Image (tube, rainbow, N blue to C red):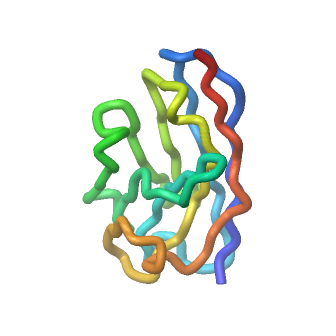
Amino acid sequence: QVQLVESGGGLVQAGGSLRLSCAASGRTFSSYGMGWFRQAPGKEREFVAAVSRLGVSTVYADSVKGRFTISRDNAKNMVYLQMSSLKPEDTAVYYCASGTTGGVSRQGPAYANWGQGTQVTVSS
């Protein structure tokens, strides 16, 4: 079991930037891939980005590619999502998730543990 706590959300104007952080505890952090997902009001949860256990491989949703960067610091048990050029359609609750393997996945069922989420609101 792993516990995940997100932070860094908030209100930002379109075109601005935010960095989300996710602190992990409870199991060997560096053994598993990590991901970020988001859910907007009235919409299904969607994949945002994922990073492999050692940070070598990353994947992104087409909607955020080139604007968002996922990274991890295994020494600190942290994963980050740097978000730039934010758009109103990026408004959502963002969730950090830990994978069941060391690789990357876009699929929710590939993740075993989830954080409580952090709200990101982008105003136009």
Seen in the image, is 42 located left or right of residue 99? right
The x and y percentages for residue 82 are 48, 36
Q: Give the quadrant of the N terminus.
A: bottom right
For residue 1, above or below residue 65: below
For residue 47, above or below residue 112: above
The x and y percentages for residue 102 are 36, 76
Q: Image point 52% across, 35% down: which residue?
A: 90
Q: Image point 63% across, 19% down: which residue?
A: 123
Front residue of 30/71: it is 71
Front residue of 80/105: it is 105
Q: Image point 47% across, 72% down: which residue?
A: 108
The x and y percentages for residue 45 are 54, 59
Q: Image point 34% across, 57% down: which residue?
A: 55
The x and y percentages for residue 32 are 44, 74
For residue 45, above or below residue 14: below
Q: Give the quadrant of the C terminus.
A: top right
Front residue of 25/94: it is 94
Seen in the image, is 27 located left or right of residue 116? left
Front residue of 39/33: it is 39
Counting labels gives 0
Residue 107 found in image quarter: bottom left
